[in-house]
Image (cartoon, rainbow, N blue to C red):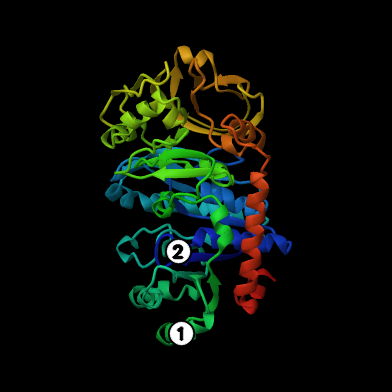
Amino acid sequence: MTKAIMLQGTGSDVGKTVLVAGLCRLAANRGLKVRPFKPQNMSNNAAVADDGGEIGRAQWLQSLAARVPSSVHMNPVLLKPQSETGSQIVVQGKVWGQAKGRDYQRLKPQLLDYVMQSFAHVGEGADLVVVEGAGSPAEINLRPGDIANMGFATRAGVPVVLVGDIDRGGVIASLVGTHTILAADDRAMISGYIINKFRGDVSLFDDGLSAVGRFTGWPCFGVVPWLKAAARLPAEDSVALERLTKGEAGALKIAVPVLPRIANFDDLDPLKAEPDVELVFVKAGEPLPADAQLVILPGSKSTISDLADLRRQGWDADLAAHVRRGGHVIGICGGYQMLGRTVRDPLGIEGSVLETEGLGLLDIETEMAPEKTVRNSTAVSSAHAEPLSGYQIHLGVTRGADCSRPFAIVDGAPDGAVSADGRIMGTYLHGLFAGDAFRARLLQGFGLSGERLDYRAGVEQALDEVAAELETYLDKSWLDRLLG
């Protein structure tokens, strides 16, 4: 059997995604054939795998870290929240169905077979598979039928390393508490733990390590500091948005309204990396800043619902005022659909609202359709004739007069729409700002120098920095046993 290790957390957002990515890059740098795997992910930040179909954006990043093509089998079950209680279920890259939380619990045993098939597929020809759990095994109310944590680990026989986040406080109680409440068979799967996001003098935590060892008997495989390079990597899901603060003042202020079902917001990471750009994520209860020169409406898992929320926040009035002042607007995917005159959903794909008025900033109309477009794409921007690459994940067909001025030619066909004055633009192409030449030309249009920043090289460098930090701070004997 292929060697495998699984990182589970004492809670959500403890840094598992970055640690798995760092271990994958470290293993790849040592010459191993390494693959990432996450049995179940819940995120609206999706990517299109190289073999077609949707996976969590985090597993796409981890495949990049491993220097291997991404595959739908790296994340066989992806839950995409559409409402407070229900999600779309994507299995091995394709839409499998929809379910509310309680119904999904009954479906999980059926999905474990798909998970095991994909795990076997990912392990073929690999020296090591690094598995990421979801949430925490301490959620023992979800243990029956579990496929994300101990349910998978016990079925696959994969040893577990528990990750605790010291930055949020209570890490000793989190580790010891997890040990206490786990069933004996699950507890036996844990081979040790890692303390993550430590700040300051690590020797001050020596007594803490002794306490954890005394209560659990688990060895510590390392105390990892706060990894600054992780900030340059795409975030896994919208939990990260809760921590986003206003960026440093820049020559160009870009405002992004944060809607409840925001999707693929990592589209904005290349702009955030630009030194002269101030990217402001506007949260509920805050107005769109009047001094923003550009407003970007990002993707949404539920266009009609998020459009209603946009109006409840008063952002439609803010956006109209922004346009009257001469401001620019770019809508991506769901954000593009919102810019039109009407969004229709005659089959009720998104919910009970079958039609709603759009923002009316583009002369277009969108109708939702059951066929989902999922593909990686190459493109050329219409305004600048610069090459683009990205991906499409969307429902709906958009038509209208402004489509006669396409935003780009995508896979040989016109995509998107541009207003007559060129200030309002929309496209279905995710990842467009990662095109260095296009991004430079876009910023030049706002008076910035637009010096070429190699965004992808920055991500690669950040992965190497994370790997180097892990090699420094993780237990050497444990790493040598794991990586050879």
Counting from the top left corner in percent of width and height, residue 148 is at 43, 58
Foreground: 153 or 421?
421
In this view, 336 is above or below 210: above
Query: Is residue 63 among the parts visible in the rendering?
Result: yes
Counting from the top left corner in percent of width and height, residue 291 is at 43, 36
What residue is drawn where x is 52% and y is 70%? 159
Residue 14's disc number: 2
In this view, 467 is above or below 476: above
- Snapshot quadrant of residue 483: bottom right
Q: Is residue 297 left or right of residue 274?
A: left
Query: Is residue 74 among the parts visible in the rendering?
Result: no
Foreground: 356 or 37?
356
What is the C-alpha distance between the residues marked 2 and 1? 20 Å
Q: Are marks 2 and 1 in contact (CB under 8 Å)?
A: no
Q: Is residue 456 left or right of residue 139?
A: right
Q: Could you tell me the amino acid type at mark 2? A: Val
What kind of element bears circle 2?
loop
What kind of element bears circle 1?
helix
Q: Nearer the viewer, mark 2 or mark 1?
A: 2
Mark 1 neighbour density, 10 Å: few (under 14) some (14–19) many (20 or more)? some
Counting from the top left corner in percent of width and height, residue 414 is at 57, 19
What residue is drawn where x is 32% and y is 43%? 286
Q: Could you tell me the amino acid type at mark 1? A: Gly
Residue 458's disc number: none
Q: Residue furthest right?
A: 31
Foreground: 129 or 209?
209
Foreground: 153 or 385?
385
In this view, 97 is above or below 168: above
